Image (cartoon, helix red, strand yellow):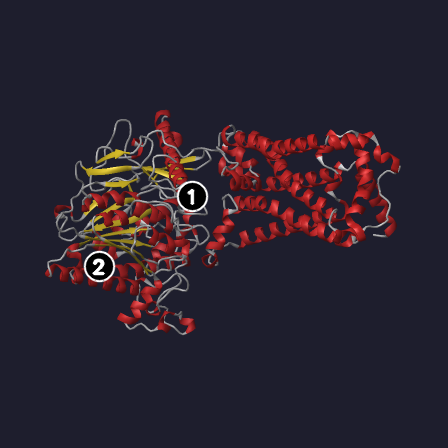
Amino acid sequence: MSPKVSSMWADPVVAALERKPWLHWGFVYAFGLVFFFCDRMLALDAIVRMYGLDEEDKTATKLAGIALGTCEDFFCLTYMVALLWIFDWKVQRVAYFQSKKLRERLARFVVYLGVFVMFTAPFVANGLLERIRQMRFTLKFVKMYWNERDAASGLEVSPHERNETYETALVTALVSIAFGAFSATWIDLSQWDVTQFFLSSEATAVVKSTKHKYEKLELGEYATDEPSTTSPIQASQLTHPAVNHVVSRHKSMLVVVTLVVLVLMVILPTGLLEVVQHHVSPAVAMVALNTTLSDIFRMITGEEFVPEIADGTLDSVTRYLDTETEVYTLAKDDVLYRRTTEFKGELVFNVSVDPANPPNVVVVVVESFRYHDSQYLVGNNTYLLAEQNITVTPNFDRWAKRGVAFRNFWSGWQTSRSLESILFGQLPYASITETGTTTGHKRVKLAGMPQFFKAKGYEPTFTTGCRIDYDQWSSFLPSHGFDDVLDQNDFKRLAEADFGVKHKDWELQEDGGKARAMSYWGVHDDIAFDVLGNILVNKTKAQTARKERNEPKVPFFVNHYTISSHTPYEDRPAWYDEYPKPDFSALYENEKSSEYVKNYLEMRYFQDMALGKFLDRMDKEGVLKDTIVVVVGDHGQGPEYGKIAPEYREISSARVAAMLIAEGRLGQSAGLLVDDVAEQYDLLNTIMDIVGLPEEGFVQDGIGRSLKRKPALAIAREHVIWSNNPVRKMSVVRGHQRLQYDAIANSIALHDTDKDHDLKHDLFPALSALEQAKWLELRDAGRKVSAYYKKRWEYKCLLETEC
């Protein structure tokens, strides 16, 4: 563009900005609002599908969401404009920029570009995630990624998702550069501010005319003799009454500025927050959501611009407790904090225990162990095993037939959440980006298995062949009841000392090793179970020696987590590569992700071999004569849906295998297959019921029941469990029906868990109005108790009456 043409285009712009300096602000607001509008439109249909109902007026929802969203965008931009105005105001007073226009423009370009990206990137990321993953973004994702940056390298991303991300990032970068370039050339927000609405035009002119003179006094040797660009006013006019008037009104103007700031940056946004949280539908609120504004408020006030479905309080906790089988004293009617003093009621099975000689207890939590890999648990539902008489877990099945197995057993999603449920009897912390173990939560007081067993005189130990720096287990476990915590480093040391494993053997085959450990997660289960076996044998021998010396037994409680069956199922010991495996082709050959499913099945079989060998050894060594063993999946898995989102196969990812082994203690209950619905959080009360409560009872805040006893059927309700996946959906299961619902949205669906494993037939619309109301009441109760635990984790008041 020639200088002449450039001047023809630029001169009117300069003239307009000089005549109407508020246009500087107007440009920033207009540019930002248009950008937010365009990006919101890209994700509009995806958001309505995620949060809306089929019967809702989608056009009305979109229009209302866009209108409300424009208000949120305006307030978000107000915070951005405030930052940029401060920068521009400061630039006018820094000597470094006064004589160098290029420096000023370069600084303005960098700052405007950076601030624009800072305020728009969360919004853009939210729209992107909603389009490609049906997830909502918050800045907590950044913290999560940093905490789990080593594991995050294994995150699976499809080509479509990668391309969509690159395109979105490129467009956002180009728009940000354009905004920065235009602003560097033309924009100076310090030329105007909202307080000028309250100054007379004459006073405003006087202030402008004196601006250059004041700057010269402040700049000293850096001052120039360039004439002021404002209208010339004689020196004698510096004593104009308007000047005195402005000065006299200085204090009152400070009040005005304060009020303007409060109104635009506090009062009105807070009012909008109230509207979003309580007065619009979830679909409208989520269409309107400006993630950046929401995160600003979350970090300052703890509140977000999303509907507040549950506030973290309960009207009454008896809805969540089995009052017919647990005797307890509540600390307060609306808190789950209570003292359990007795279990009673009709037995489902019995475990014979001598109070004077309490048994040892081992809880083995198996990575990604879904129930339908077991032919024994699946039973007549042969379609889950391709109508073949085949099982992926022959050793689990063999031992389950000797103990008590649970075929209608449910979990949450992700391993850390299983710690919360299994050990402490809770519904896990409801967050996509965090769990109860995140940051270690050292100051959160908890009551669960470690505390119970300590009260009973046991030695609690946590073991795993896995790394425990993931999700801050290394801080969480020692802080919440485990005196001894052994991880992959301890297991490697013990394996090298006791089993002759060479240090080089841990490395992968391509690195010259024997792949006895995984590339990232830890020691494979075959060697980990060998080490665990030695630990249990040595503890049992020590008990025998103490008994011979007429000393107390000191029983042990061990919680062990496995790891080999962790996605992506490609890491395996060198010996297993050559090992003959069953033909599982009927279970994977027709799947879209057939190779991925094949790898899963082979590693599930490997893990089952290691588990079977371990249990057989414990039986042979006499450990099981005095030890009760619980085996349970930490969560399920859905490899049939591929690497990207296996949790989308909802039942596969949440319905897990579980069994209890108590050799010589079960009597006629041996071989029992329990079909009552149960959840991981039931294990705490179950084990306390088996082992026996301390004389003074046990203080806890769980919502589980004892599986040893038949669930009570109270008036107007049946026993249910809640199984939540914060990454995907929440659910409530009653019998063999599962209602899937959202933490915020109104979308729901009801399915038969035995006959409709892939959730293709929604039963809810065909229900009577009364039955629908019952299910919706269960949904609301699930939302409330989930919010209850989340709030009490955050405020560190799980074992307190007030929060």
* Residue 308 vertical position relative to residue 224 in the rendered view, above or below: above
Q: Could you say which quadrant of the image residue 290 lies in?
A: top right
Horizontal arrangement in the rendering, residue 215 relative to residue 381 (left or right): right
Q: Pointers 2 and 1 in contact (CB under 8 A)?
A: no
| Residue closer to the observer: 382 or 748 | 748
Q: Is residue 179 left or right of residue 645?
A: right
Residue 248: percent from left, percent from top: 74, 30
Looking at the rendering, in which quadrant would you find the C terminus?
Answer: top left
**Can residue 233 be seen from the camera position used here?**
no
Q: Which mark is residue 726?
A: 1
Report x, y in % for residue 125. Answer: 56, 47
Q: Of helix, strand and loop, which one carries label 1?
A: loop
CA separation, marks 2 and 1?
34 Å
Q: Amino acid at mark 1?
A: Pro
The reply, left or right, for residue 439 in relation to residue 463 is right
Quadrant of residue 710 within the rendered picture: top left
- Residue pointed to by mark 2: 615
- Looking at numbered disc 2 in the image, what kind of residue is underneath it? Leu
Q: Residue at x 74, y 33 (%)?
A: 196
List x then y, in percent, for residue 72.
59, 35
x and y percentages locating residue 388 in the rendered image = 29, 53
Disc 2 on helix, strand or loop?
helix
- Few, some or many residues within 10 Å of mark 1 (<14, 14–19, 20+): many
Q: Badge 2: few (under 14), some or many (20 or more) residues near its Cα, within 10 Å?
A: many
Q: Is residue 468 shown to the viewer in this render? A: yes
